[in-house]
Amino acid sequence: MALPSGVVRALPGEGLALVSDSGSLAFRSKLPGGAPEHLASVSGVLVTGLPAGLLAGVDAGDGRVLWKRRMRTAAILPCGARALVLAAGALACIEPESGRPVWERELPDDAHELVLHEGAVLLLAGARHCRSRSVTAPRGRPCRCPGRAARVRGRRGAHRGRPGGAAMRLDGRKRWAIAASGDTPAPALLHRGVMLLHRGAIELIDAAEGLPLAQLPPARGAALGSDLSCALIQDDAVSLHRLATHLSLV
């Protein structure tokens, strides 16, 4: 994870370390159970989910463990100046400096894929998706949550991509789903309302409507740029395609 002061990396069997922009070791922190399974940087604190079934806060400046509490974590996301923590059967909003919960809500035990979108929380639970009306802080003040989606990010909707080129839109009036085609584990990509899916061939999809825009040749790897150019890595070549008025130009 990149921070303003450097890069945080997990240390298997030990904990985590911060390497500064100059390449020097800023700190090395030993944590109960070893390297964190989940981590988010919130208000100068690294909120970590540890394999020992603990949630802990680590000072991002010197690596000191600020607090620990018993919680087996499934996901952690920043939410303004606080952290949202998804655990078995519960969702909690945590003060990063103390670990104190601002609020907690019961959820289905199989809830997963925590998503923040337009001030609301979206989760998958079994074959359904759940949406809270809002994420609020004490006294009704809104908790500013930047739009973000599981595996795929975008400003105009919450989407989810799965192996084999499967994808779905989880919010809004126009919800859609595309079934898998193949077994590639490559994640979906999203830029400016266009989603790239690995479905044998490379497909570009309108993220709002779920409609196909272009089909490109199969590739071992693909990247989608903010200008909607698409680079494909094939066995013996690299090609660049650009989406323009629903046409693919090589």
Image (tube, grey):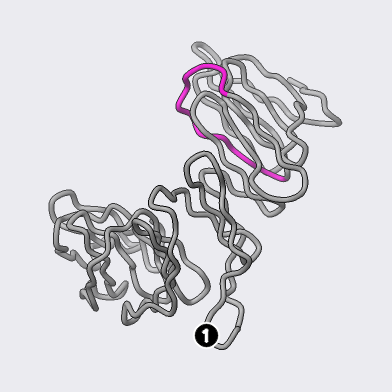
| Residue drawn 40% across the image and 66% down it | 41
Between 213 and 51, the residue placed more toward the observer is 51
Q: How many marks?
A: 1
| Residue drawn 77% across the image and 48% down it | 173
Q: Which percent across, then down, holds residue 105?
A: 45, 68
Relative horizontal placement of residue 166, taking residue 228 as reference (left or right): left
The amino acid sitting under disc 1 is Pro
Q: Secondary structure at mark 1?
A: helix
Q: Which percent across, then down, holds residue 101?
A: 38, 77
Q: Which percent across, then down, holds residue 204?
A: 69, 28
Task: Determine if the magenta segment contains residue 182.
Answer: yes
The outermost residue toward the bottom is: 139
State the quadrant of the N terminus.
Answer: bottom left
**Magenta segment boundaries in residue numbering:** 180-192
Between 178 and 198, the residue placed more toward the observer is 178
The outermost residue toward the right is: 245
Q: Quadrant of residue 189?
A: top right
Say above or below: 211 vs 50: above
Label 1, residues with CA under 10 Å away: few <14, some 14-19, many ≥20? few
Q: Quadrant of residue 39?
A: bottom left
Q: Which percent across, then down, holds residue 120?
A: 60, 63
Task: Determine if the magenta segment contains residue 10.
Answer: no
Between 28 and 181, the residue placed more toward the observer is 181
State the quadrant of the C terminus.
Answer: top right
Say above or below: 100 vs 187: below
Between 32 and 72, the residue placed more toward the observer is 72
Relative horizontal placement of residue 107, taking residue 13 as reference (left or right): right
| Residue drawn 74% across the image and 29% down it | 242
| Residue drawn 26% across the image and 69% down it | 56
Relative horizontal placement of residue 54, taking residue 107 as reference (left or right): left
Residue ID for mark 1: 138
Name the magenta segment's main secondary structure.
loop
